[in-house]
Image: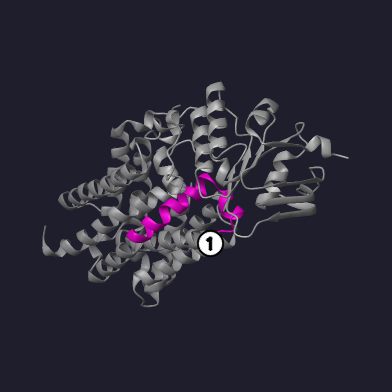
Amino acid sequence: MGDLFVTPFIAGLLLALLLPLVGNLLRLRDEWLATLGLAHLAAAGALLGMAAHLPSFLGAWAGALTGAGAKRAGGGRSNSAYGLMILAGWALTLLVAANTALGDALAHALIDGQLYFAGWRELVIDVIVLLLALPALRWLTPRLIAARLFPERERANRLPAWRWHLGFDLLAASAIAAGTATLGLMASFALIFVPPWLAFRLAPDWRRAQWLAGGFGVAGYGLAFALALIFDQPFGPVLAAVFVALFGFSGLGRRPVSAEF
Amino acid sequence: MLRLVDAVAGYAQPVSPAATFSVARGEVVGLAGPNGIGKSTLLKAVLGAARLCAGRIERAPETRIGYLPQQPVRLPEVPLCGRELLAALGADRLAPPARLAERLALRIDRLSGGEYQLLMLWATLAGEGDLILLDEPTNSLDRAHIQTACDEIAAARGQRATLVVSHDRGFLEAVSTRIVDLGATHG
């Protein structure tokens, strides 16, 4: 691998580890569709930011935070709200692309996956996000598990639950923004969606679900990076195809969605 | 630890009759009454999940509540074992009953209905609550599980105040130190 690709590879590798871990908690909260909504808004924000000569991560972060704020203001979870986020992000991305000097090229880069353009700035941001996210996930996980399985516990005990619900929304928005700015929209979604899905089917407990999701993320990313480089293909679609193939080969797609009792 | 004075609970409209009783530390109070009279609604009013339409509900300051709902949340697919669930709730300091202990390494979505109910009951009893509210804790439990539930509620009694709602009068008589009949207080 030439020096040109080392920085993008490492930047993406960090996110290939982090995004599936965040995805496990999003799946626990039944919020995986929110991921796609936030990623679309992050892409739109990144493009708007670049049009204003700002770093792509700042725009992506602002876009994802706007989505997370709208979600909370709307009273929490709603697939309809997430659907609106997807439509709003998609429309805004393409309209900004069509009406600024950035043109289609950057919009396609964000949507298709522009990993090879990631540089030191993206790497530094990804390192910071990872270093903040790992201890935060450790603190948040038991609280979010308790909230999911005993939802009345927080209200009954007047717990300051907003801290961990808002904290996780911010963490997810930051991770998705970093992913969108580094890997592109659908590659980020693939990393946050498929490895947790596999881990939820296969892992015997939460600890090993974390290892499995992170492992699938890193392995799939490494394979996609190599395939895209060898066959000179765009990274984002190759990564998504690798994860779809991984899911198919696992044979899990043939199993019923509901759990076995 | 908990006192209700002429408390009427409901949502848009009142559901339960006025109820006056108290629950002290060391007591297990059974709340009996015919179906639909509002036993569960009264319990939810203590939590703040239903409306207090009239009367008063007083909780001792700093009281922490453990609550087992009538139908505990059951996720169709989640890679979480019983031991991890107890740890997340701070309910892993006490030794669980033997028949539950042997199932704690399994994913909670692979447990039978009775095993899952027993796990959720234990998670409530062994958690950090000083006031335990149990709504139909014998749902899905077979006879052996019910006996385990009775034993564990009795074992946890000393440090807690416990309020149990059940349609099963025999269970209430076995587990309670006192029974309040909501039907008898009606009218």
Q: Quadrant of residue A71?
A: bottom right
Q: Which residues are magenta?
A: A134-162
Whole-percent x, y for residue A91 in the image = 48, 61
Give the chain of mark 1: A
Whole-percent x, y for residue A161 in the image = 53, 59
For mark 1, what is the residue?
Answer: A162
Magenta highlight: main SS: helix
Q: Which quadrant, please, contains the C terminus of chain A?
A: top left
Q: In this view of the protein, can residue B80 be seen by the observer?
A: no
The single residue placed furthest to the top in the displayed view is B143
Q: Which quadrant, please, contains the N terminus of chain A?
A: bottom left
Kindly identify the residue that appears in the image at 52 percent across and 52 percent down. A83
Q: Nearer the viewer, residue A149 or A117?
A: A149
The single residue placed furthest to the right in the displayed view is B187
From this view, report whether residue A244 is shown above or below residue A163. Answer: above
The single residue placed furthest to the left in the displayed view is A2
Whole-percent x, y for residue B140 in the image = 57, 27
Kindly identify the residue that appears in the image at 28 percent across and 46 percent down. A211
Q: Nearer the viewer, residue B4 or A239?
A: B4
